[in-house]
Image (spheres, rainbow, N blue to C red):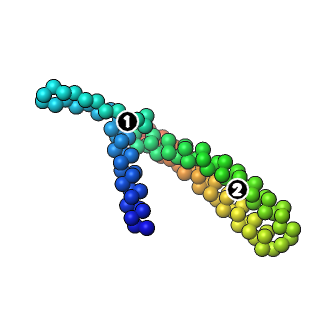
Amino acid sequence: MMHFIKNKIKHFLTIFFLVQAHSVEAAGNDGINFKMKSFLGVSSIEEFILAVLNVFITVAIPIIVIMIIYSGFLYVTANGNESQVTKANTSMTYTVLGGILVIGAVALAGVIKNLLVAIG
């Protein structure tokens, strides 16, 4: 588990430095110039995080809708069976909480970005 976390941190730092290298220009003493631009199209870590969250919400919303439909299907097919109704309630509860967390994360990231832009 620790190896997995270290690996994810390495990937995040690699992407972070790629984002920060949005436009780097350098000139050596021998007159050789080079310019490096980020292929991601973002100029700050805030924009990168918002882009990742937007992709995440684009994938998560259809999954949330499918899970709500599945929970409704569980309710309909329960036929009064208490354990099936409990399973349907649990499924619906977790789906709604997951949806709130996903939408809340994107909203919170947008608010934080706007606050940082307003301050600096």
The image shows residue 20 at horizontal and vertical percentages of 34, 40
Viewer-closest of 10 and 52: 10
The image shows residue 6 at horizontal and vertical percentages of 37, 61
Q: Residues within 10 Å of mark 1 (few under 14, many from 20)?
A: some
Quarter of the N terminus within the rendering: bottom left
Q: Which residue is mark 2?
A: 67
The image shows residue 11 at horizontal and vertical percentages of 39, 52
- Secondary structure, mark 2, is helix
Disc 1 and disc 2 in contact, CB within 8 angstroms: no
Q: Which residue is mark 1?
A: 38
Quarter of the C terminus within the rendering: top left
Left or right, 60 with reference to 119: right
* Whether residue 111 is visible: no
The image shows residue 73 at horizontal and vertical percentages of 79, 59
Residue at figure coordinates x 33%, y 38% from the top left: 21
Is 83 rendered above or below residue 23? below
Residue at figure coordinates x 41%, y 62% from the top left: 5
Residue 88 position by quadrant: bottom right
Is 26 rendered above or below residue 20? above
